[in-house]
Image (cartoon, rainbow, N blue to C red):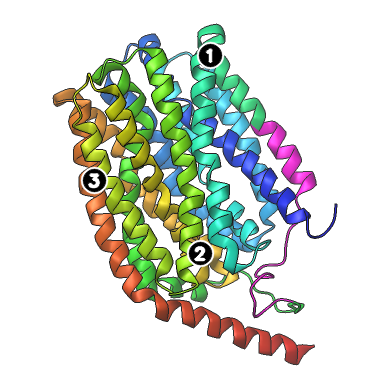
């Protein structure tokens, strides 16, 4: 394989990892009803199952970030895939609800392994195209949900929800082998313009001083606040929207499938569109990526409210508004990740990304449980509206402030890399 093609092999491998890992993580949404029926539990108890994995993931994000910045990232990612397979099989095997909560929660260990994946990817592609690359890579997330939904609806009726878990867990073992033997560890920061062509002899790995310096970047702090509130809607929609269509709007399985397939495909399109727009405007203004993010959040908020308020018998109008909501929802995702990498040193990028994910998960981990409690006392529709509107309003405010502050932090990083390049040239 040629040197120019190898980064795309890595991209393809990671795309497959994300696609099937997301399928495993999100397949439980379409399987919610049969799982509830087997264990004879209510919506609040099912919300606890959802939240368990999110809480475990939130706790372990900083741990994964630290490990990725200290040790070989590719080998750690292979370990994560192995854990994904093992914990999913355990979830399929247990017979009681308390043990199911424990084993399903343990799948959150692998769910929090993504900082290393993004970090490796960024060391294979230059900054000018990272928004596009992140957007293309993140297509795997909604497509993973689609794969999980198809597995649940088609295979679930044949092999049961436990059989579906065995299938998705097996893929984890396969991905562990491919990553361990097939993906090479790149030099940290090798694609930064200031460091290209320079052999870095310094040991640039995680250190606490650099890591703590992340909290001195004002724009990064507001991005963390955005992340804390921003995933509330995603968790609620991911885990509860399938049931909302079934019980709230009275859709049969065929209508649910058609509605969700269209929505997920539009969601998949939104990631690269957001990333490409972010790259385009970033080349013209350093605030470009975050302004695209803010616009996407605001438009998605308005469209979702209109969609939810559509009368139940107007299926086409509901589906139309939902589809356009899904285009704008992911605009922020590739741009926020790319912005975080654009302002942090290579040796703490996994940590910075892990902190981002930690704030996302630590806040939103209670979202499925909160939605279940609100649904039991009111309705699932009200739960979706209350959580999504309040969270996205705060996100728009936080990301707008970050956009105002970001140019200084971006320039600080470029200056630090120039100084590092001068040191390495002097050593040579």
Residue reaching furthest to the bottom: 426
Q: Secondary structure at mark 2?
A: helix
- Name the residue: 22% across, 53% down: 393
Q: Is residue 135 left or right of residue 360?
A: right
Image: magenta residue range: 172-196
Q: Residues within 10 Å of mark 1 (few under 14, many from 20)?
A: few
Quadrant of the image occupied by residue 51: top left
The reply to whether residue 407 is visible in this rendering is yes
Question: Is 227 included in the stretch rendered in magenta?
Answer: no
Question: Is 179 included in the stretch rendered in magenta?
Answer: yes
The reply to whether residue 217 is visible in this rendering is no
328 to 126, vertically: above or below = above
- Name the residue: 55% across, 7% down: 158
Residue 154 percent coordinates (x, y) = 53, 14
Q: Secondary structure at mark 3?
A: helix
- Name the residue: 64% across, 57% down: 121
Q: Is residue 29 left or right of residue 413?
A: left
- Name the residue: 32% across, 57% down: 295
48 to 391, vertically: above or below = above
Quadrant of the image occupied by residue 387: top left
Quadrant of the image occupied by residue 173: top right
- The residue where tag 1 is placed is 154
- The residue where tag 2 is placed is 279
Tell me the CA gap for discs 1 and 3.
34 Å
- The residue where tag 3 is placed is 302
Residue 70 percent coordinates (x, y) = 63, 63
- Residue 85 is tagged as none
Tell me the CA gap for discs 3 and 2.
25 Å
């Amino acid at each position: 394989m040629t040197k120019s093609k190898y980064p795309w092999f890595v991209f393809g491998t990671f795309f497959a990892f994300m696609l099937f890992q997301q399928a495993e993580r999100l397949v439980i949404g379409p399987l919610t009803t049969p799982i509830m029926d087997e264990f004879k539990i209510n919506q609040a108890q099912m919300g606890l199952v959802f939240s368990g994995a999110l809480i475990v993931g939130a706790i372990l994000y900083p741990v994964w970030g630290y490990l990725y910045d200290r040790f070989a990232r590719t080998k750690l990612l292979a370990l994560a895939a192995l854990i994904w397979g093992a914990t999913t099989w355990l979830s399929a095997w247990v017979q009681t609800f308390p043990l199911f909560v424990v084993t399903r929660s343990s799948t959150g260990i692998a769910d929090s392994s993504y900082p290393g994946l993004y970090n490796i990817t960024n060391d294979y592609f230059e900054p000018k195209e990272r928004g596009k690359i992140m957007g293309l890579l993140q297509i795997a997330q909604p497509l993973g949900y689609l794969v999980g939904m198809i597995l649940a609806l088609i295979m679930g009726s044949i092999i049961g929800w436990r059989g579906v878990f065995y299938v998705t867990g097996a893929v984890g073992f396969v991905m562990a082998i491919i990553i361990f033997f097939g993906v090479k560890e790149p030099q940290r920061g090798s694609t930064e313009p200031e460091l290209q062509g320079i052999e870095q002899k310094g040991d640039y790995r995680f250190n606490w001083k650099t890591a703590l310096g992340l909290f001195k970047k004002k724009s990064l702090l507001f991005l963390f606040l955005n992340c804390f509130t921003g995933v509330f809607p995603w968790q609620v929609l991911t885990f509860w929207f399938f049931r909302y269509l079934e019980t709230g709007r009275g859709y049969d399985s065929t209508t649910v499938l058609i509605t969700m397939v269209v929505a997920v495909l539009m969601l998949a399109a939104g990631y690269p569109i957001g990333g490409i727009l972010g790259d385009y405007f970033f080349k013209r203004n350093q605030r470009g990526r975050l302004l695209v993010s803010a616009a996407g959040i605001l438009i998605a908020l308005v469209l979702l409210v209109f969609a939810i308020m559509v009368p139940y018998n107007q299926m086409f109008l509901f589906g139309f508004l939902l589809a356009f909501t899904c285009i704008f929802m992911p605009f922020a995702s590739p741009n926020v990740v790319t912005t975080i990498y654009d302002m942090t040193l290579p040796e703490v990028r996994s940590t910075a990304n892990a902190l981002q994910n930690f704030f996302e998960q630590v806040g939103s981990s209670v979202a499925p449980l909160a939605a279940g409690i609100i649904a039991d006392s009111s309705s699932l529709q009200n739960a979706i509206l209350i959580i999504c509107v309040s969270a996205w309003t705060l996100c728009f405010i936080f990301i707008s402030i970050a956009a105002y502050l970001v140019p200084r932090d971006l320039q600080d990083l470029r200056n630090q890399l120039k100084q590092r390049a001068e040191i390495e040239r002097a050593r040579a």
